[in-house]
Amino acid sequence: MTLKLMKKREEMKVKTKKNVNKRQLFQLLLSYCDYGEVMKVWMGPKPVVILSGPRAAQALLSTKKSIEKGLTYKFIEAWLSTGLLTSTGSKWHSRRKMLTPAFHFKILENFVDVFNQHSDKMVEKLRGKADGSLFNITQYITLCTLDIICETAMGCTVNAQDDKDSEYVKALYKVNASITERLAKLWQHFDFLYWLLGYAKERDAAIKVLHKVSRETIQERRKIYEQEKKKTKDFTYEDKLLGKRKQLTFLDLLLEASEGDNGLCDEDIREEVDTFMFEGHDTTATAINWFLYVLGRHPEIQAHVHEELDSIFGDSERPVTMADLREMKYFEMCIKETLRLYPSVPAISRCLTNDLIIGDTVLPTGTNVGLMIYKIHRDPTQFPEPEKFDPDRFLPENVTKRHPYAFIPFSAGPRNCIGQKFAMMEEKVVLGNVLRQFRVESDTPMEDIQLLWEVVLRPRYGNFIRLIPRRP
């Protein structure tokens, strides 16, 4: 059955007016998912098929053919060009193959020190707020993750936690805001209107700042790399991956990998560095925010988390190690359950380059498809009482009972998130250092939370919590 033959009740129009904001649009799309796991809706003049079930997710994400991102990803290309996130075809395949070794566990282990350093700084800043009064922790977390991603990606420090008004930080916020605004307002989807109304000019001025910092950093690191290369001629790329040299940043690894047949120029490297900055900053900050909020609503589960942390660290102030991360098993279950309820990226899109068969439905080539991860994670057949926060869902014996595509916070298949291990490690270190020092309380009931879809999924008014010191 083709799209033209789908039942009448499955053909619904999203009449998006100018006063429909990002929050309303997200809720509107979620409401249409209730009619079935494969739905056709109209986004202005464009038809889009919305998928909201694990079976449909598997059909879309497991294929090696339709890996082209949807039209909305075009809005990111002014900043990221065609790096790993937005590229397709042979370019994507070659980049993915080249970048995969950069996420070898030995490389990630070297980043634990960076996670500790910047999260310790955040904890010290939070001590001044730990008086039992409500405050919005969102910016503290965002600036911390920004410091982490800058150092791990580029080897430079923007000192965001000490200088939140720096030109780079403000430019990053501006570009992120422009992307989310354009996604939500359909008239901005038309390039000529986007330019005519002046939105492009504001966005491009901010992108110019981001590109300037990336290019200058690449040039500086290349000079250092060439000097180091003369001193270590006997080291191979594999040696460096296995830790036989000093800690390497993501940028260093790109410089290493660009030699030989890959032939990456500085602009190619800039694409990937900026992509890592985009994908690894806001997503992780959002996940950390949601974790603290949810744990603040469930003191009995928080007590269990504290017990596990105390069994690992005792009263020690020592930094978190890779060995500690492996022991944080219940902690990881809580992170996964948070990502189930509040996936950092609640929806993704594809443009089909081949027909896609889902049951008895055929989606033809050229169809724009939106996958509602948020809705899939709330499938009651896979997760009974889906609104309930229950980390035991991720006990091994419970995981094996579910559909393999019922939980996909990092997407799945060939185009899954290459940095998911990095993200999980960062979240464990940052959150572990916070919870070793503080107890968290949240006043807002989960049913009262208003969701805001801005590429990532945020609470509309920020994350207001209380922090109480655990020790004198």
Image: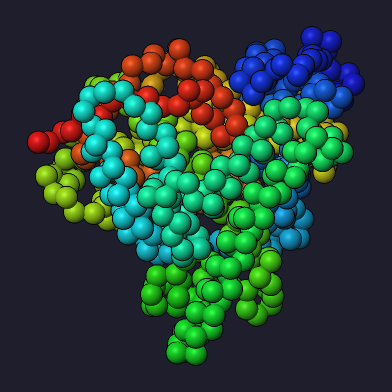
Rendered-image quadrant of the N terminus: top right
Q: What percent of the width, then of the height, locates residue 280?
A: 51, 48
Relative to 382, say whether 312 is above or below: below
Residue at the location (51% across, 18% down)? Answer: 450
Observer-nearest of 256 and 334:
256
Observer-nearest of 386 and 144:
144
Observer-nearest of 434 and 411:
434
Residue at the location (49% across, 76% down)? Answer: 238
Rendering quarter of residue 248: bottom left
Q: How many marks?
A: 0
Q: Is residue 308 left or right of residue 425?
A: left
The scheme the figure's colours follow is: rainbow
Q: Is residue 128 left or right of residue 118?
A: left
The answer, for residue 238, to whether it is visible in the render is yes
Residue at the location (13% across, 44% down)? Answer: 314
Residue extending furthest right?
4
Relative to 125, say whether 188 is above or below: above
